[in-house]
């Protein structure tokens, strides 16, 4: 759907006060760019129609990665004059030139097209601005293609070129997911033709990941596969913000291309594809420590109670009133809060309910502690514990226990800090094992939450895909 921009610009220019006319024109362009790409911060300069100084400056990015694009407004639509202006731009700045009228046809149009390509400049007139789709919460392939135009489009793009680009990329992404060569090749050609190399490589990497996820061999990929061993945070962000991909096989094949450090740099906080990714990643990625913290509110956009999130550089599983963060090192998490120690009977009941072997228990009584250890055997059902509980008047609190994960890894669980980790500062175990034991032993879970955790982080193997398996994407 095209949004008419030309009438708004004409109306703004009709203001009798030239200074007000300038501000009104900037209002129109800024408002339109914001509706299309709200993640960017757009600021105005004091200039208008200046040769070197931009009228608007767009900046965006996440974490330490920052990007910008200078926006120049032009009152002329003469192709020859615009070509002279563009020839003065630095291609590293990837300028966005917005003529306030449609570029005139004529012999100079081809030269303007050539100069714009050479100087990595996007010329976006009123019809092109109006053809860009407004931002939507659902990040469809068309939305990702629109972002690519705003961030690094080049050449002269009218409504026809915009709509063709969006359609081709949307079809190409879907085709790559299905392992279909011809539509994927056409989309890769469009990306190379209409975007600067950095954006083109990013989109190509994204489609290559889709191709890998389809189960097709990268030797058959209908384009140049980027020389990378993993997806970078930009490509991964595109993937996680795209429309939901429900195929378990897809995520099983994609997971080896991704690591936790890359995920936290994407800026993605909570999407449906993040949930899909983490169902596979929880069984493959390894961490050293889990910390469960209270959360007064658990906002969610779906009916799912337990969801994976990325929050301030940390990966966590959010439940009703809790977030369980996992990390490769204790220093990656905040200092733990202090929580009441549960009674011995409570800890024994939790361990028995979920068949968690407990090999050691440390009990606190007033200002004394009592240890009950074994040589690696489960002590949950030892009758001696009944005697200890009776002798202490059932007022004892368990401050720590050694528990075994489903594969027999020892886990030190602190009840007053709600932290758990294996012995040794560098010991790592899969997220699924770390979380399944920690959550079940450190929290009082009802049947609904217990079932939800079992579904999300089950330590059983995922079913293998019907597609044949292959080496990882971009392996040399």
Image: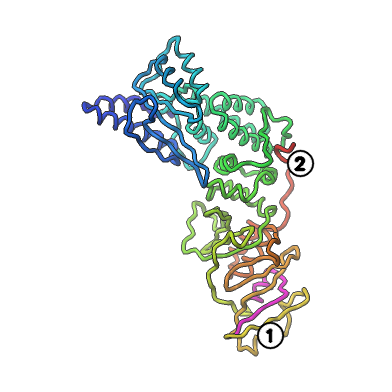
Of the image marks 1 and 2, the number of the one nearer the N terminus? 1
Which of the 4 image quadrants contains residue 193? top right
242 horizontally vs 351: left or right: left
Query: The C terminus appears in which quarter of the rendering?
Result: top right
Residue 98 x/y as whole percent? 40, 26
Along the line of sight, which residue is nearer the eye, 82 or 315?
Answer: 82
Label annotation for residue 386: 1
Along the line of sight, which residue is nearer the eye, 303 or 221?
Answer: 221
Residue 163 seen in render: no
Label annotation for residue 469: 2
Residue 93 x/y as whole percent? 48, 30
Query: What residue lies at 49% left-to-right and 13% top-to-bottom?
Result: 110
Query: What residue lies at 34% left-to-right and 34% top-to-bottom?
Result: 45
Please state the extent of the stretch shown in magenta in the rendering: 347-365
**Element type at marker 2?**
loop
296 horizontally vs 244: left or right: left
Label annotation for residue 350: none
Residue 29 x/y as whole percent? 36, 31
Residue 370 x/y as whole percent? 66, 83
Query: The N terminus appears in which quarter of the rendering?
Result: top left
Query: What residue lies at 49% left-to-right and 18% top-to-bottom?
Result: 113
> Can residue 362 be found in the magenta stretch?
yes
Residue 189 seen in render: yes
**Above or below: residue 364 compared with residue 204:** below
Q: Are marks 1 and 2 in contact (CB under 8 Å)?
A: no
Which of the 4 image quadrants contains residue 282? bottom right
Q: Residues within 10 Å of mark 2 (few under 14, many from 20)?
A: few
Which of the 4 image quadrants contains residue 442? bottom right
């Amino acid at each position: 759907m095209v949004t008419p921009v030309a009438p708004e610009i004409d109306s703004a220019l009709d203001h009798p006060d030239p200074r007000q006319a300038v501000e009104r024109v900037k209002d129109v362009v800024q408002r339109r760019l914001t509706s299309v790409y709200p993640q960017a911060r757009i600021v105005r300069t004091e200039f208008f129609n200046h040769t070197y100084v931009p009228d608007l400056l767009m900046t965006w990015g996440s974490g330490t990665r920052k990007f910008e694009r200078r926006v120049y407004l032009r009152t002329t639509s003469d192709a020859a004059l615009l070509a002279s202006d563009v020839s003065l731009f630095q291609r590293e700045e990837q300028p966005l030139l917005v003529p306030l009228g449609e570029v005139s046809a004529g012999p100079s149009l081809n030269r303007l097209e050539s100069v714009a390509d050479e100087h990595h400049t996007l010329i976006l007139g009123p019809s092109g601005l109006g053809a860009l789709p407004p931002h939507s919460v659902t990040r469809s392939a068309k939305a990702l293609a629109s972002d690519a135009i705003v961030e690094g489009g080049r050449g002269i793009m009218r409504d026809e070129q915009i709509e063709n680009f969006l359609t081709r990329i949307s079809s190409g992404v879907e085709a790559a997911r299905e392992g279909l060569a011809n539509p994927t090749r056409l989309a890769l050609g469009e990306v190379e033709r209409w975007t600067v190399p950095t954006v083109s490589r990013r989109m190509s990497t994204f489609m290559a990941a889709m191709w890998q996820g389809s189960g097709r061999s990268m030797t058959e990929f209908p384009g140049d596969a980027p020389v990378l061993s993993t997806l970078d945070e930009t490509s991964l962000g595109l993937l996680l913000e795209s429309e939901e991909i429900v195929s378990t096989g897809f995520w099983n094949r994609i997971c080896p291309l991704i690591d936790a450090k890359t995920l936290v740099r994407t800026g993605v906080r909570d999407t449906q594809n993040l949930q899909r990714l983490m169902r596979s990643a929880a069984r493959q990625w390894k961490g050293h420590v889990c910390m469960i913290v209270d959360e007064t509110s658990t906002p969610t956009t779906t009916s799912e109670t337990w969801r994976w999130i990325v929050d301030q550089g940390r990966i966590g599983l959010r439940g009703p009133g809790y977030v369980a963060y996992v990390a490769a090192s204790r220093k990656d998490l905040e200092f733990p809060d202090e929580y009441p120690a549960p009674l011995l009977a409570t800890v024994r009941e939790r361990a028995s309910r979920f068949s968690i072997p407990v090999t050691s228990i440390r009990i606190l009584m007033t200002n004394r502690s009592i240890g009950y250890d074994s040589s690696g055997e489960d002590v949950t059902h030892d009758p001696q514990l009944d005697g200890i509980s009776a002798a202490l008047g059932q007022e004892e609190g368990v401050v720590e226990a050694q528990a075994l994960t489903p594969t027999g890894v020892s886990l030190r669980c602190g009840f007053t800090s709600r932290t758990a980790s294996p012995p040794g500062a560098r010991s790592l175990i899969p997220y699924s094992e770390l979380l399944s034991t920690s959550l079940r032993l450190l929290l009082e879970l009802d049947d609904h939450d217990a079932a939800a955790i079992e579904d999300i982080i089950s330590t059983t193997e995922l079913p293998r895909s019907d597609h044949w398996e292959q080496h990882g994407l971009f392996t040399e």
